Image (spheres, rainbow, N blue to C red):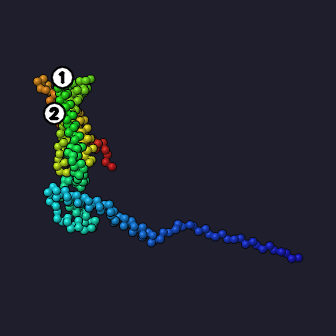
């Protein structure tokens, strides 16, 4: 009797799982990206080169027009078309036209070419606005000073003990004197800036903010530091007026002093890291 044997079924062997590896970037692509990055930093845009050339020409015209000495080393640098030479010429001319800057010179040329038939006050709204504010402060000073509500007794009461229309007139008097002081300071600065061609468009914002600071400074100084003499023959009105005028005129100095005090106090409570 024959016995039949079943053949053993062949079990397929599992293939070893191979981990997937991310594709490697070729060395050529990496080197190409590096070269492109280096070229991006080394290259100079045509707009920047054109701006340098324009500023160099404006500074040379400004120096010649105002009788300033121009460094002759600038001439061969300008004739070359190299960016390095333009930057070198730009640096030399910046030293020649100081204290003016390329930005202030461009603003001066813009004011000169714009509305040539108009007066200087129309071309410079900043100067016009300062003069208008000076007239307003002077009129307010005269009107409040002539009022019987403003006297040494009412000023002695100060902000805390005065009220109503009396307080309004006394504050108007002190604020007008503070405004005269700060406008006097700003008009002197603007005159010097126009003469030296150092005026820039951002000065209009700076001067408006300084007027507000001057009014606050004069009022605070006159009220806080106002000293009262015991002799009744002396006039306290003069003392507070001087303090208000000094407070308005020396706005920058007072701000620097207060900022220095705050920094010293802050340093006492700040631990070093």
* Rendered image quadrant of residue 187: top left
Can you identify the residue that label 1 sits on?
148
- Work out whether 75 lies above or below 144: below
Residue at the (20%, 27%) spot, across then down: 144
Residue at the (22%, 63%) spot, across then down: 89
- Work out whether 267 lies above or below 239: below
Q: Which mark is residue 68?
A: none
Residue at the (15%, 55%) spot, across then down: 66
Residue at the (26%, 41%) spot, across then down: 208
The one nearer the camera, 177 or 26, is 177
- Work out whether 248 lies above or below 36: above
How many other residues sit within 10 Å of disc 2, few (<14), some (14-19) or many (≥20)? Answer: some
- Work out whether 206 lies above or below 241: below
The one nearer the camera, 219 or 72, is 72
Name the outermost residue toward the left: 233
Whole-angstrom CA distance, mark 2 to mark 1, is: 20 Å
Total marks in image: 2
> Where residue 190 sits in the image (x, y, percent)?
19, 45
* Rendered image quadrant of residue 45: bottom left
> Where residue 141 sits in the image (x, y, percent)?
19, 31
Name the outermost residue toward the bottom: 2
Q: Earlier in the sequence, mark 2 or mark 1?
A: 1
- Of badges 2 and 1, nearer the viewer stands 1
How many other residues sit within 10 Å of disc 1, few (<14), some (14-19) or many (≥20)? Answer: few
Q: Which mark is residue 242?
A: 2
> Where residue 211 sits in the image (x, y, percent)?
24, 39
* Image-based side of 145 in relation to 30, left or right: left
Helix, strand or loop status at disc 1: loop
The one nearer the camera, 49 or 152, is 49
Residue 146 in view: yes
> Where residue 47 sits in the image (x, y, percent)?
32, 60
The N terminus - image quarter: bottom right
């Amino acid at each position: 009797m024959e016995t039949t044997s079943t053949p053993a079924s062949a079990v397929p062997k599992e293939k070893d799982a191979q981990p997937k590896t991310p594709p490697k970037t070729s060395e050529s692509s990496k080197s190409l990206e590096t070269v492109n990055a280096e070229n991006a930093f080394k290259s100079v845009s045509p707009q920047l080169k054109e701006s340098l050339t324009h500023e160099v020409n404006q500074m040379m015209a400004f120096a010649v027009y105002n009788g300033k000495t121009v460094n002759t080393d600038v001439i061969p640098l300008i004739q070359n078309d190299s960016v390095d030479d333009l930057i070198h010429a730009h640096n030399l001319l910046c030293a020649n036209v100081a204290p003016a800057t390329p930005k202030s010179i461009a603003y001066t040329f813009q004011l000169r070419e714009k509305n040539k038939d108009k007066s200087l006050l129309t071309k410079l709204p900043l100067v016009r606005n300062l003069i208008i504010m000076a007239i307003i402060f002077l009129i307010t000073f005269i009107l409040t000073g002539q009022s019987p509500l403003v006297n040494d007794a009412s000023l002695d009461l100060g902000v805390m003990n005065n009220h109503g229309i009396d307080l309004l007139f006394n504050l108007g008097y002190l604020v007008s004197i503070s405004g005269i002081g700060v406008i006097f300071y700003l008009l002197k600065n603007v005159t010097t800036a126009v003469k030296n061609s150092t005026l820039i468009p951002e000065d209009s914002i700076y001067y408006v903010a300084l007027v507000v600071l001057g009014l606050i400074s004069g009022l605070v100084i006159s009220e806080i530091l106002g000293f009262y003499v015991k002799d009744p023959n002396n006039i306290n009105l003069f003392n507070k007026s001087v303090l208000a005028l000094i407070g308005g005129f020396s706005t920058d100095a007072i701000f620097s002093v207060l900022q220095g005090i705050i920094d010293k106090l802050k340093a006492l409570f700040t631990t070093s890291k």
